Image: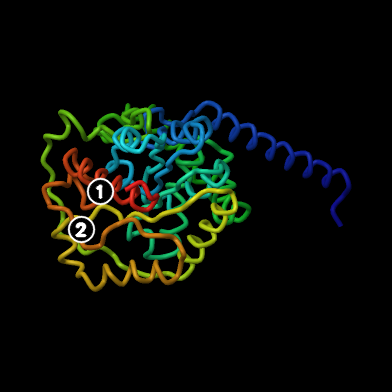
Amino acid sequence: MIPKNDLLKFLKNTTLVVVLVAVAITAIFIATPPDDKHLYQASLLKSNLLHTVPSPRIIIVGGSNVAFGIDSELMEQELGIPVINDGLHVALGIAPLNEIKDYLRPGDIVIISLEYYNFTDEQSFYGQPQYLADWVEFSPERIWYLRDPYKQMPSIFTIMLERKVNRQLNYYLNGFSYEAGRNFYSGDLFNEHGDFIGHLGENGNKQFEIADSVYPINLIESAYVFLEDFNQFALSKGAMVYYEAQAHRQTNCEQTGKKHLDRFFNRLKTKTTIPLLTNLDQLCLPDDYFYDTPYHLNEQGRRVRTERLIDSLKVALGLK
């Protein structure tokens, strides 16, 4: 049997260690703010737009194919409705869609444009932990937008802590700067609508070699269940939901095969009641409309895609 004094001493020491660890962790979180030019810094702009822009408005959500590939200002001019580009990064999955649910109002129009990669497995659909940790770091209450927040909370905040410590160590030991690796993928290169514009203008002259890879067409059932549940939730709030196909590069389309592309959209039509805006006969765009990946449109491609989306939306809304 452990003597009472030894037990008390053990408990006091354990409590002290726990308190010191808690203080150290708290100090790290307070002393190490998020990277103020991280791409996800723009998520604060997008959240503010969701909060402040009056309804009815158009909200376009998806990965970087949306962030790079939509001219929201042109849409707003042509349709006479405020437009918010809520696209950011494919690895966040549908977590931003869960955030949008808190801001839906009657008359809103949500256009979903996920990327095929999101449908490859459940982690890709619901978001990858290391990227979700960066997203949550900018606004910790976003933990509640994850698929299973109570289960994911320990790992997400552990990843966040680890990345903060590494950030500080790299800075103090190696003089590491994020500027060199960031290039133009910076959170301050978004306009007032939430469009990424860092690849326009002078940066648009850069040349990148784009892989002629196959789009990963996989079909996970839980994805369609989620999308239909989101659609029904939006309808209950007086909002409408549409689906817009991601940007498609011609060579990658050909490598993938039309029957596989058609299968994806046919499954979307049969598994959900979300109307598809995209004309599948005009699905693929010329290779020279793309910037650095088969998902990112350059300035010319961005305009063509936006004009097509405007026309499709006018038809869907009975405006044309």
Name the kind of residue labelled 1 in the image: Arg
User: Circles 2 and 1: CB distance less than 8 Å?
Assistant: yes
Number of marks in picture: 2
- Cα distance, mark 2 to mark 1? 9 Å
Label 2, residues with CA under 10 Å away: few <14, some 14-19, many ≥20? few
> Does residue 196 appear left or right of residue 253 in this picture?
right
Q: Is residue 38 above or below residue 280?
A: above
The residue tagged 2 is 282
Name the kind of residue labelled 2 in the image: Gln
Quadrant where the N terminus lies? bottom right
Q: Earlier in the sequence, mark 2 or mark 1?
A: 2
Q: What percent of the width, then of the height, locates residue 81?
A: 41, 36
> Does residue 61 appear left or right of residue 200 in this picture?
right
Mark 2, secondary structure of its residue:
helix
Mark 1, secondary structure of its residue:
helix
The residue sitting at 15% across, 65% down in the picture is 254
> Does residue 127 appear left or right of residue 24 in this picture?
left
The residue sitting at 39% across, 66% down in the picture is 268
The residue sitting at 43% across, 53% down in the picture is 93
Q: Which mark is residue 308?
A: 1
In the figure, residue 279 lies in which quadrant? bottom left
Label 1, residues with CA under 10 Å away: few <14, some 14-19, many ≥20? some
Q: Which mark is residue 64?
A: none
In front of the other: 187 or 257: 257
Q: Is residue 175 above or below residue 123?
A: above
